[in-house]
Image: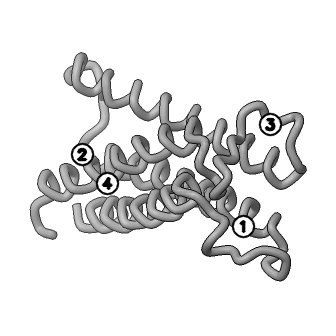
Amino acid sequence: MDNPKLLRKINLTLILITCQLILIITFGGGWSSTGFALIPYPSLYWWASTTAIILYIALAITFLYIAWLVVQVVYPDKIPLDLKNIMFIDMIVSGILSLLLIFAFSFFAGGFNGSTYSIFRTLGYSFWFCVIAAITGVGSMISAGLGWFRS
């Protein structure tokens, strides 16, 4: 934890895993065991529409973050930020993505009214990827926060 550049690489790996999983779960059709897709969202139940809107917001933030990374790689001299400020931005982005993903899978699982369905059997791969992405997002937020605090 004393090497901020190594911590940044670990944090960047976790954020990119989270971003990749957001791409999969936004366009994936496996939100339930029946292949329930969230697109198009206006014709769905309110909780599924809310989940879809949250995922579209997370997808937009993901694209903005990827654009930020591209700018960092292409024009490293034009960014007036040091490593500490970049770690702070990483921490904020991963925190926002984690919260959005937690809200997304909470709305989706809450829409099933746990008593009607067996939650663990009816939820598909996109739901579980959303849970994993939220966990990696929290891990990224913690590592970025530690890197920001230590440097």
Q: How far apart, in angstroms, are the residues tagged by discs 4 and 2?
A: 17 Å
Q: Is residue 62 above or below residue 8?
A: above
**Residue closest to the eye, 134 or 40:** 40
Q: Is residue 74 above or below residue 104?
A: above
Label 4 Cα crowd, 10 Å radius (few <14 / some 14-19 / many 20+): many
User: What residue is rendered at 32% in x and 21% in y?
Assistant: 71
Q: Residue furthest front?
A: 34
Q: Do the residues bearing badges 4 and 2 touch, measured as CB atoms within 8 Å?
A: no
Image position, residue 103 (x, y; %): 68, 60
- Label 2 secondary element: helix
Q: Which residue is mark 1?
A: 109
User: What residue is rendered at 37% in x and 66% in y?
Assistant: 139
Q: Which residue is mark 4?
A: 14
Image position, residue 68 (x, y; %): 39, 28
Q: Earlier in the sequence, mark 2 or mark 1?
A: 2
Label 1 Cα crowd, 10 Å radius (few <14 / some 14-19 / many 20+): many
Looking at the rendered structure, the kind of residue marked 2 is: Leu
Q: How far apart, in angstroms, are the residues tagged by discs 4 and 3?
A: 29 Å
Q: How far apart, in angstroms, are the residues tagged by discs 1 and 4?
A: 25 Å
Tag shown at residue 41:
3
Image position, residue 58 (x, y; %): 59, 42
Give residue 115's quadrant in the image: bottom right
Q: Nearer the viewer, mark 1 or mark 4?
A: 1
Tag shown at residue 83:
2
Looking at the rendered structure, the kind of residue marked 4 is: Leu
